[in-house]
Amino acid sequence: MDHKQGKDMILMTTTTLSKWGNSSAIRIPNQFLKRLNLEEGAEIQIIVTPENDLLLRPTAKPQESNEELRAHLKLLLSKIKPGSSRHEEIDLGIEGDELI
């Protein structure tokens, strides 16, 4: 497995095909799932290339969880001081045929 740090590294491992009911399955290591922000139940495309390579691709872009979004919003809101002006008014002038 590649040991570089950061999102530019390519993760690679070997796994074994296992029996699962009338189908077969592979296990995807947690390190891969965390990097892709995938959880159990995520929909995955299975693609076989002309070279007979097998590609697995999430059908939707990974999104932040609601908990992460709430924590980020809470952090942003904590930076707003009560009674402080949010921003200065900006006069953009008149453009077009607006009537004021």
Image: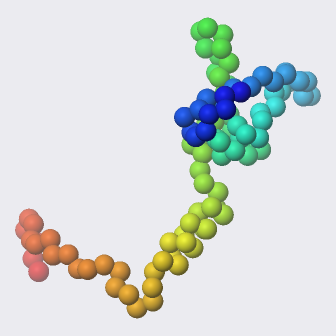
In the figure, residue 22 lies in which quadrant? top right
Residue 6 screen position, x and y as percent: 58, 40
Taking 36 as reference, is 27 above or below it?
above
In the image as oriented, which residue stretches furthest toward the bottom? 83
Name the foreground residue: 22 vs 82: 82
In which quadrant is the C terminus drawn? bottom left
Work out whether residue 22 can be spotted: no
Q: How is the image coloured?
A: rainbow
In the image as oriented, which residue stretches furthest toward the top? 51
Residue found at x 9% / y 71%: 94
Residue found at x 34% / y 85%: 85
Work out whether residue 14 can be spotted: yes
Taking 98 as reference, is 65 above or below it?
above
In which quadrant is the N terminus drawn? top right
Taking 62 as reference, is 90 above or below it?
below
Name the foreground residue: 99 vs 16: 16
- Numbered circles on residues, count: 0
Residue 9 screen position, x and y as percent: 59, 32
Q: Is residue 90 left or right of residue 70?
A: left
In the figure, residue 66 lies in which quadrant? bottom right
Residue 96 screen position, x and y as percent: 8, 65
Residue found at x 68% / y 18%: 54
Q: Is residue 25 left or right of residue 33?
A: right
Taking 38 as reference, is 87 above or below it?
below
In the figure, residue 69 lies in which quadrant? bottom right
Residue found at x 10% / y 72%: 93
